[in-house]
Amino acid sequence: GDSVTQMEGPVTLSEEAFLTINCTYTATGYPSLFWYVQYPGEGLQLLLKATKADDKGSNKGFEATYRKETTSFHLEKGSVQVSDSAVYFCALRNKFGNEKLTFGTGTRLTIIP
Amino acid sequence: DGGITQSPKYLFRKEGQNVTLSCEQNLNHDAMYWYRQDPGQGLRLIYYSQIVNDFQKGDIAEGYSVSREKKESFPLTVTSAQKNPTAFYLCASSIGRDNEQFFGPGTRLTVL
């Protein structure tokens, strides 16, 4: 079945550091890929998405590129801020079957001033 | 102001009791979903509904029930048959099944 593997956290960085959170997936066909962010005590918000190979999703300084050859969708940001502290989830949605979202386990990110 | 509301934010229940979690959306979305989130785990799909009066089991439906009598409402009942109900429950909706899902703020259920 479909699955998503994220780098384990927690991740702690200093403000203005470069961020990478790794995400790889296993799926049949050509899934759409997503990054969601969850701030403390809140629901999930869509951060960015990519629907086909080589697409780059971007939002709020975050980027991720859909790499079919390595089945990856790594999240990057050039200079993180304290306000980026949250849990980040990588997810895929397969166009076959019931099109449910399959989530990774989440990566907790803490940015220290 | 469109969005998804879940109530209550925190819910406590005694073991053996059924409890119903509310989810309402005013986004005019056809599809609605219930997920469960446990510490250190991703979200797991409990039930989903693509249209009024229709719903399907997700990956972990045992011990849960839902109804979809109105487009804007998709309540989840956690029954006494659910062996480990303490968790954070998230409701989501989308225009259609291949569109972005929007999430509510969640309900944290604790069984005492």
Image (spheres, coloured by chain):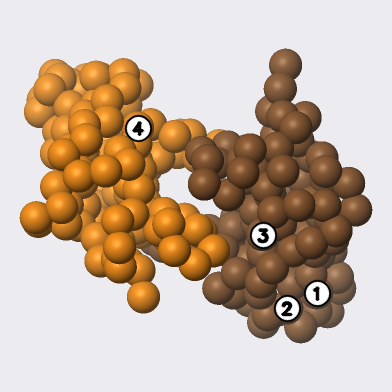
Chain colours: A orange, B brown
Label 1 and label 2 in one chain: yes
Mark 1 crowdedness (10 Å alpha carbons): few <14, some 14-19, many ≥20: some
Depth order, front residue of B109/A73: A73
**Which chain letter matches label 1?**
B
| Res A53 visible | yes
Give percent across and percent down for residue A64.
21, 36
Would you place residue A29 above or below residue B75 in this image?
A: below
Foreground: disc 1 or disc 4: 4
At a point 68% along the width and 80% down the height, the residue shown is B62
**In the figure, A103 relative to A63: above or below?**
below
Task: Give the residue number, with chain letter if any, for mark 3.
Answer: B48
Q: Are marks 4 and 3 in contact (CB under 8 Å)?
A: no
Residue A61 drawn at (x, y percent): 24, 19
Which circle's residue, 1 or 3, is located before the other in the chain? Answer: 3
Please report whichever mark, 2 or 3, sits nearer to the chain's N-terminal start.
3
Look at mark 1 in the image and give the residue it sits on. Answer: B79
- In front of the other: B18 or B43: B43
- Name the residue that disc number 2 marks: B63
